[in-house]
Amino acid sequence: MRRLLLAALAAMCVSSVAEAQGRQDFTMVNRSGYQINEIYVGPSSSTNWGRDLLGQNVLVNGRTFNVTFSGNSNECRYDIKIVYEDRDQSELRRVNLCLVSRVIMYWDRERNNTRFVTE
């Protein structure tokens, strides 16, 4: 009985630590038809975008990119900015990353802008 209780407590601790470290983590999916050269993700409460998450890499059409957080923030609302190869930019504001696991980007030819879908 004691072993079962200790095992259950250990599982709860591991689960809550993993949840705290990555509750804002998500996957970006490029379905735009174009190459993305830069990705920025910053808290909606800040005016600072921070660094380009792709660095020297690019996100080609049809590929995914995993965005991970260190777990130092309890904030859930984030803004996302992408910069295409031709320097055109699109933004998605106030995304609740605590509830979102995927952000899919599509180019909307009719409206001439990027359409974001969250899951």
Image (cartoon, rainbow, N blue to C red):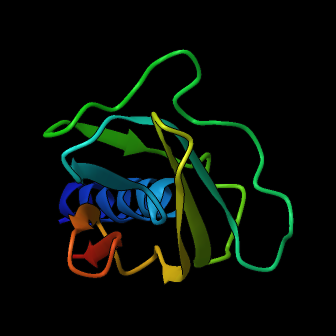
Residue 74, relative to residue 104: is it above or below? below
Name the quarter where the C terminus is drawn: bottom left
> Is 7 placed left or right of 45 in the picture?
left
Judged from this view, the residue extending furthest toward the right is 47
Judged from this view, the residue extending furthest toward the top is 56
**Which residue is nearer to you in this view: 87 or 50?**
87
> Is 45 placed left or right of 8 in the picture?
right
The location of residue 115, given as percent across then percent down, is 30, 74
**Which residue is nearer to you in this view: 62 or 50?**
62
**Which residue is nearer to you in this view: 27 or 5?**
27
**Which residue is nearer to you in this view: 114 or 73?**
114
- Point 27% across, 41% down: residue: 34
Residue 26, relative to residue 68: is it above or below? below
- Point 78% across, 47% down: residue: 50
- Point 26% across, 31% down: residue: 60
The location of residue 3, given as percent across then percent down, is 23, 54
> Is 5 placed left or right of 22 in the picture?
left
Disc tally is: 0
The location of residue 80, given as percent across then percent down, is 55, 63
Residue 1, relative to residue 84: is it above or below? below
Q: In which quarter of the image is residue 108?
A: bottom left
> Is 10 placed left or right of 102 in the picture?
right
Name the quarter where the N terminus is drawn: bottom left
Judged from this view, the residue extending furthest toward the left is 62
